[in-house]
Image: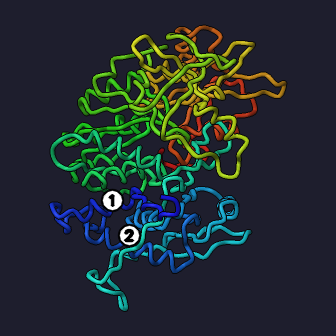
Amino acid sequence: MPGSPRPPYESYVDALLAVLARPELPPERTVLTTADRTVDARALRTGIHRAARLLAAHGVTRASTVALLTGNHPETLIARYGANLLGARVVHLSPTAPAAARARILEATAAVLLLVDPATRDLPTGTPEPLRLTLDPGLFTEDRPGRLPDRHTLRTPAAARPEDDWCLRFTGGTTGPPKLVRLAHGPYRRILAAHTAHVPSGAPPRFLACTTLAHVAGIVSDATLLAGGSVVLQEGFEPAGVLAAVERYRVTDLWLLPPLLHELLDHPDLATTDVRALRRLFYGGTPASAARLRRAAEVFGPVLHGSYGQTETGPIAEVLPHEHVVTGPGGRVTAGRPLPGVDIEIRDPSGAALPPGGTGEVHVRTPTAMAGYWGRPEPAAEVLRDGWTATGDLGLLDGEGYLHLVDRLKETVIVVGAHLHPAEVEEVLHAHPAVARCAAFGIRTADGNEELHVAVVPAPGRSPDADAARLLADFVTARLGAVYEPAAIHVMDRLPLTEAGKPDKVRLRSRYGGGAKEPARHDPDPVGGPGGRSDG
């Protein structure tokens, strides 16, 4: 009826609160676990309402922006849930970014509140800043003097609408400056519903969040709690710690980007770790080596789930455990079949759809697409066209509907007129026994030409010298042709990673941008140092 009140919208936080209050699920069951404390379902539910009231008291309302400069702590999730319940959006600030860069984000997003860890020292400076609130442990879940007991806790009216942003999330930033993607509540509910619809039967899921909650680990945490499960929070990825947690907590679900999965496979503790509780090991975000995935399947069993998607689109396709035998160009494992409700087209440069087998840019039509880029309508208009999203990925669809990725359009390296795909080089080198991890990228020389460079992390017990690097270059050219011969191979102890946990090719280009011709260089301290271990 005209003029009738709009019916309330049930956001993902409303759904989570309902799960936490289910009478058939014990309120004292543990839902969040850290190294030194646990949070039960009753405390989490109460904490979300307390967080919403506290944020509202600090000026947070529907359509406000709340910034988070926090790690993998219960308060990080609870603060986000409280903000989203109010209809506010959140933006996670990178702990490795300079203070001035964080300040620019606060100003650009008009953040009204900045939530920080107690240990945070390098705070944003140089521009007007929002009020800060320190997320002390137990801020929302422990009874303190003057606080009402749980039985008197007031429900916070939900204010979010399906078109409201729940989050501003950075793109991966692997090929250029990252952008802030606007993600709305309505599409996010669909993403979470799809994830929880396929929880294996048996005990409730237990997810180990060992990469940043600012990216995919936060999404999987939400889906796990919505499925009645629990989340183990670990501060950063460290392979020995991850393996110990998988065994100790009987972890059923784990998300890793391929570079981190490779580290897990290379760690000596893996041979003596009980991983039998694992039911789903998700991977995605960067190309995965077929050889490494075969090894992972041997170690972990039929639990691998490949995921292809983008921040702009949400999940696009999935590779189920039995589908890892399906390979495409260069022997790489398929990116999978489209998820329900997702359409994929491969288009040539003119925009015409290509038949099966044709290679072109991947375009996606999905109900989980982004609302746009924050404050940047022009780039958004280039990506979003007539209900389709241009992914910037090169790929093909085979006759059975499997998607096979070739490379990123912007990562294509043009050497003497030949278009080279770094992903092909990475796939070849990941099959070499002397290589643990690698990243191929283009360098523009002083005369304007491009060269193909490769950063290589040696396999355990291997430390390639110049002669060994020459053999690696020969290994590539023998399989891909002379045009793929790397101009330089840089040996590193560890690849620099973006905040999303992907090989940081922007940093690699910056470091090696002089067009070096030597066949090998050893860098024990990669750009960015030993930190920066997080995901997507």
Image point (64%, 47%), residue name: 373
Which is more toward the observer, 440 or 471?
A: 440
Q: Is residue 464 left or right of residue 261?
A: right
Q: Quadrant of residue 453?
A: top right
The residue carrying mark 2 is: 48
Which residue type does callout 2 highlight?
Ile
Which is more toward the observer, 164 or 117?
A: 164
- Residue 134 visible within the image: yes
* Color style of the picture: rainbow
Q: Quadrant of residue 102?
A: bottom right
Image point (45%, 48%), residue name: 188
Image point (32%, 73%), residue name: 46
Image point (37%, 65%), residue name: 74
Residue 65: percent from left, percent from top: 58, 64
Residue 231: percent from left, percent from top: 30, 55
Give the class, few, some or many, for how many residues have Cα within 10 Å of label 2's Cα (few <14, many ≥20): many
Indicate whether 91 appears above or below 476. Answer: below
